[in-house]
């Protein structure tokens, strides 16, 4: 199976509407059901979730890691496949990108900014036990979600690192 065929198989797996027509020029946007414009993928949480799942599977399948610039680019299908091939030839580049992502972490600042407004509200609502209880539950849910996200991201990065290093040793 060619690189293009593998990429397209993964693409179809992550699409909202598998088998629907798409434009090769901005195929990533067709992870969404009916993109209205080029770059629509980046304008929705649903699109970004599908995009990240697609990229994660492509990275793992080919033992590569896209840089942050690659993640921001809206490649055509041919350019995307070419980029996959380029990264396969340069495992060091993939390792550098992955180590940068691992070093950056998953955004501890995000949890601070999610909790900060809740703390401020709790201070103002400190005389209302029910309001404080609700805020504590909301904070617990947010923090649990973040911990789950963080653990999953670290596990994925560790698996990808191992796969890239294994592929590098075989070449």
Image: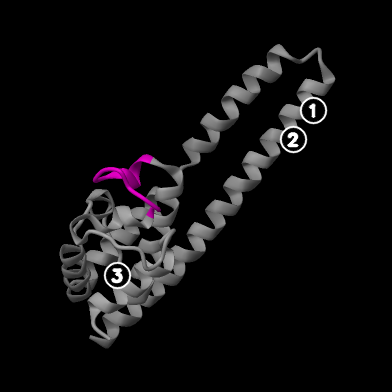
Evaluate whether residue 95 shows in this view.
yes
Are dots 3 and 2 in contact, CB under 8 Å?
Answer: no
Q: In this view, does 153 lie above or below 63?
A: above
Left or right of 23? Residue 56 is: right
Marks 3 and 1, how far apart at CA: 46 Å
- Is the residue 108 above or below the residue 119 in the image? below
The quadrant in which residue 5 appears is bottom left
Query: Which residue corresponds to mark 2?
Result: 137
Q: Which residue is drawn at 66% across and 18% down?
A: 121
Q: Do the residues labelled 2 and 1 touch (CB within 8 Å)?
A: yes
Query: Which mark is on residue 64?
Result: 3
Magenta segment's dominant SS is loop
Element at label 3: loop
The residue at which mark 1 appears reads as: 133
Front position in the image: 143 or 10: 10
- Image: magenta residue range: 32-43
Q: Quadrant of the N terminus?
A: bottom left
- The Cα atoms of the two marked residues, 3 and 2, are separated by 40 Å
Residue 2 drawn at (x, y percent): 23, 83
Circles 3 and 1, Cβ within 8 Å, touching? The answer is: no
């Amino acid at each position: 199976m060619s690189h293009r065929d593998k990429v397209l198989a993964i693409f179809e797996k992550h699409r909202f509407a598998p088998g629907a027509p798409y434009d090769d020029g901005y195929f990533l946007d067709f992870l969404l059901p009916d993109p209205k414009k080029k770059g629509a993928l980046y304008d929705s949480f649903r699109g970004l979730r599908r995009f990240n799942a697609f990229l994660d599977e492509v990275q793992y399948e080919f033992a590569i890691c896209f840089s942050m610039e690659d993640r921001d680019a809206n490649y055509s299908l041919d350019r995307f496949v070419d980029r996959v091939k380029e990264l396969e030839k340069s495992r060091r580049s993939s390792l550098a990108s992955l180590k940068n992502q691992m070093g950056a972490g998953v955004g501890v600042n995000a949890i601070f900014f999610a909790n900060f407004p809740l703390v401020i509200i709790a201070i103002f609502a400190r005389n209302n036990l029910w309001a404080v209880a609700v805020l504590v539950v909301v904070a617990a849910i947010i923090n649990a979600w973040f911990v789950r996200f963080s653990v999953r991201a670290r596990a994925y990065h560790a698996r990808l690192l191992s796969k890239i290093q294994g592929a590098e040793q075989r070449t």
